[in-house]
Image (spheres, grey):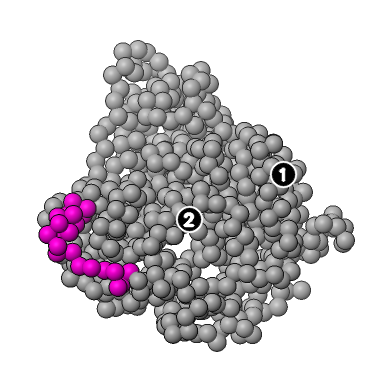
Amino acid sequence: MAKMRAVDAAVKILEREGISVTFGVPGAAINPFYSALKAQGKIRHVLARHVEGASHMADGYSRAVAGNIGVCIGTSGPAGTDMITGLYTAQADSIPILCITGQAPRARLYKEDFQAVDIETIAKSVTKWAVCVREPALVPMVFQQAFHVMRSGRPGPVLIDLPIDVQLAEIEFDEDTYESLVVHRPRATRRQAEKALRMMNDAERPLIVSGGGVINADACKQLVEFAELTGIPVIPTLMGWGSIPDDHSLMAGMVGLQTSHRYGNANLLESDFVFGIGNRWANRHTGSIDVYTKGRKFVHVDIEPTQIGRVFGPDFGIVSDAGAALAMFIEVAREMKAKGTLKDRSAWVATCAHRKANMLRKSHFDSVPLKPQRVYQEMNEVLGRDTCYVTTIGLSQIAGAQFLKVYSPRNWINCGQAGPLGWTLPAALGVRAADPDRKIVALSGDYDFQFMLEELAVGAQHKLPYLHVVVNNSYLGLIRQAQRGFQMDFEVSLAFDNVNIEADGDAVRGYGVDHVTVAEGLGCKAIRVKSPNEFKAAFARAEELMEEFKVPVVLEFILERVTNISMGTEIDNVNEFEEILCLDPNLSLRNSQDLGNIGPKAKALEPTK
């Protein structure tokens, strides 16, 4: 047992819990914690330019590698409130991050002290646990419990608020005997697995829906093994994309109103049984529950008991970690196969594969300004199977999910439920900090990119190189498309004549912000692409610049102002605004019936002058 400051004990616990990188912004009320970080010198700190950015960096860091927990640090008052968006994003997608904030002295709490806010109460609704530590001796136990909470059950974020006098107080702490608390995760039973597989075996056209819980459990190999053993096609959710490779014969496409494949929706609509594993039936995936559930039975497996039946009541629910459930399912399926009782699914698999090969969207356009579909086509051709994509909400994300290919878990890092603009850039930096060797490509629309543009300087300062693809139509594209329903185009244009751009220069004056100049001013490299014949050379040059300078490289593509991306109000009524490729004319277009929206009817109102 040794005497030390409470913050010194806290930093020692971070080290013992496997923390090697933190993200944050120092300030007066958290400086004691920073002094402990500096004194011990074993944990790297990445200085953000905005505290919300630090929280998204921690989020990306956690998502990048199984078992990672990102840590973000800020001072009292606005630093904590700035990180609320990051906590919400992590909570929504079941991502463990630890947020540590400074606080006014205990004697000044609730007295409207400078930069003193009740962050514990504010954060409670967007965390698994939020606590203001009021007794110095509790600091070690609170940090120990924080890691236990983040890792047990459904993962999620924790906030620890430390009054400055608590940080500085001397306590006794025995580092040598410190141990992590045993993590609890529920496990499917044998009887549950047998019932679920009997239900699956009774079906004629079953599908597996693989959610983000499969990736969180690091159970993608088990998922593929289970699918191959039973011969059941797999529908990954947006958060589960990569749990089975896109070119696997049993990958049946994604389902949804926006981030979906035509063949994925068609396959789901023809199914009669859905085996959901580690998913939460998100509304962008299901559309209305009546359409999604009609004519099919459901088994739902989730680590969180309150998720079973939250959106709709399944025919059978199992509370279990996805990895533990899949291990039991594989055991039972092997026995069924050995007995010859597993149904042959080859005809159903062939039907799903036929749709996958034929129900496609066109991506090859040679027009100038560029169509976004062509950008994603080029990315598929140039970037390779090992590319890790990082993105948030917007037409850029939606079209990316429709056209890109993902072949490995954690190679599609996407904030699925909260979708805050600005998340992409700092999250990509967090992914890079977690993995120095991975090929990382961030994907943003111009507005997402502008939200936290200042964090590019973090990548330059800390040598965190990655490629940032910006598809620029100078619009809030998704909101502009949604405004079609109101017959308006109102306050969604980002275009203006930038007085600092020459009319005949390389930049596009009428598109407003000169992203190339801004990126270079922040210490990074940038390339602008305006025609299809520049694509491959631009990607090659970007790779060279990253290798040479070890900084983020921005690759901006100048798009046509208005392109409507396929989406709809139901999974059986997705509007296809661009030409589609139906290589088999006999295939049902059940998920794209409103084909009248292709062509003139799909044009948005003219941009505001």
Kindly identify the residue that appears in the image at 73 percent across and 61 percent down. Answer: 533
Label annotation for residue 406:
2
Give the residue drawn at x 62%, y 83%.
599
Q: Position of residue 295 (x, y in %)?
A: 27, 78
Closest to the observer, 416 or 547: 547
Tell me the element at label 2.
loop
- On screen, residue 467 versus residue 140, left or right, reads right
Identify the image quadrant of the N terminus.
top left
Structural distance between the alpha carbons of marks 1 and 2: 26 Å
Magenta highlight: main SS: helix
Question: Is residue 333 part of the magenta span, yes or no?
Answer: yes
Would you name the residue on which mark 1 appears? Answer: 525
Q: Is residue 107 visible?
A: yes
Identity of the residue drawn at 64% across and 85% down: 600
- The image position of residue 337, as x and y in percent, is 17, 59
For this view, does 96 lie left or right of residue 453? left
Q: Please, what is the three-letter code of the amino acid marked with disc 2?
A: Val
Magenta region, residue range: 329-349
